[in-house]
Every structure is written in C-alpha cells, then in structure tokens.
Amino acid sequence: RIMAKYQGGKVGTLSRLREQLKKGGGGAFIKNVPANDVMVVRFLTEPDEWFKYDEAYDTEVRRYYPMLEGMERSPDVRVSVRFLANVLDVTDDKVIPLKMTKDLANRVMMRYDRYDTVLDRDYELSRMGEGLDTTYDCAPGDKVARNLKKYTLLDLDDVLVKAARSEE
C-alpha cells in the first residue's frame, strides 16, 4: 500500500455532501456490474482505449484496490487483471468508470469483432453468482444513434490513482 498525503477541501453544497455520503459516492469511483442484476451502458471508447491494470484484494479491510506502479505487494494478496472503460450509465445518464473482469472484457470484445465497434448500441451487462462461481453476460441492444459528444470522458489514470489511494 502507498501512503498519500491528505487531500481534501470543503464539501461545497449539501447535495454534493449527500452524494459523497452514499456508498461509493464522491466522484469518479469505479463501478462494477451489480451482482445478480443488469446494468445498461453505452461504451464511450473503443477497446483499444480501455485501461488494463492489476487489482489486489486486501483481506484485512476486505476491499479491492488497483495496484499502482511501485506499490509493494505482499505474497498473501490475491491479484487479478482488470480492465477499466469509460461508459455511459444509460439509466442515470452519467459517465462512469466501469471495471470489467477478463471474462466480461472478452465478451465485449466478441461484440466488437462482430460489429467493428462497441459505440453504436447500448449493452446490457449482467453478473450472476459470486466468488469463483461468477459468470458475466454482454447482450447488445439494437443499433441506436446517441449523441455521445455531449459527455466528458473521465481520466481513467486519475480514477485508478484515486481508487488506489482511498481508505488508506
């Protein structure tokens, strides 16, 4: 784990504070496909712009965090490869950083190979099961135009750094 200096500031508004107090709230936190549920997203970048990173699981505090370059890794920490993409959460009409396992990223890549893009339709992403018995699915919707230029992409490098340094 790395040590980060305190970074903070005024909350700003009460509505912003309420958002920050929600579980995982407060900014560009990394989103997972919810367990035993479906989320509808529109990818905002092609797969060659996704970030690949290692993710560790800290058994003491029971949380996942991205491994940054230079971070010390203890031998008992479980590390997995993950992919991070800018997506539009269609339900909330909000850009989020979506974490994908290798399995889910492969399923999205199969759609990319079929359509030569992942930007032209919404996708229903789902996760069933838990632990080692987890399966993912990626169901494409119909090809539908959507004005993607109105959305600002997140700096995924910055998202990973913030996630790695949180809750130290």
Image (spheres, rainbow, N blue to C red):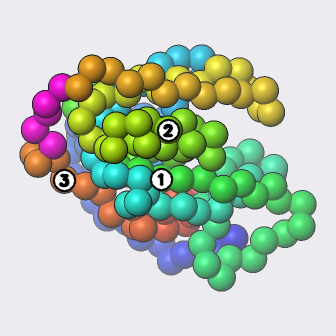
- Residue marked by disc 3: 152
Residue 157, given in percent of the width and then of the height, sits at 42, 67
Give the left or right position of residue 45, taking residue 80 as reference.
left
Foreground mark, 2 or 3? 2
In the rendered structure, which amino acid carries the disc numbered 1?
Answer: Leu
Give the residue furthest to the bottom: 70
Find the magenta span and give its range: 144-148
Q: Amino acid at mark 2?
A: Met
- Marks 1 and 2: in contact by CB < 8 Å? no
Quarter of the picture holding the N terminus: bottom right
Give the quarter of the image for residue 105: top right
Q: Position of residue 138 (x, y in %)?
A: 49, 27
Marks 2 and 1, how far apart at CA: 17 Å
Q: Residue 137 sits in which quadrant? A: top right
Which of 103 and 77 lies nearest the eye of the viewer?
103
Residue type highlighted by circle 3:
Thr
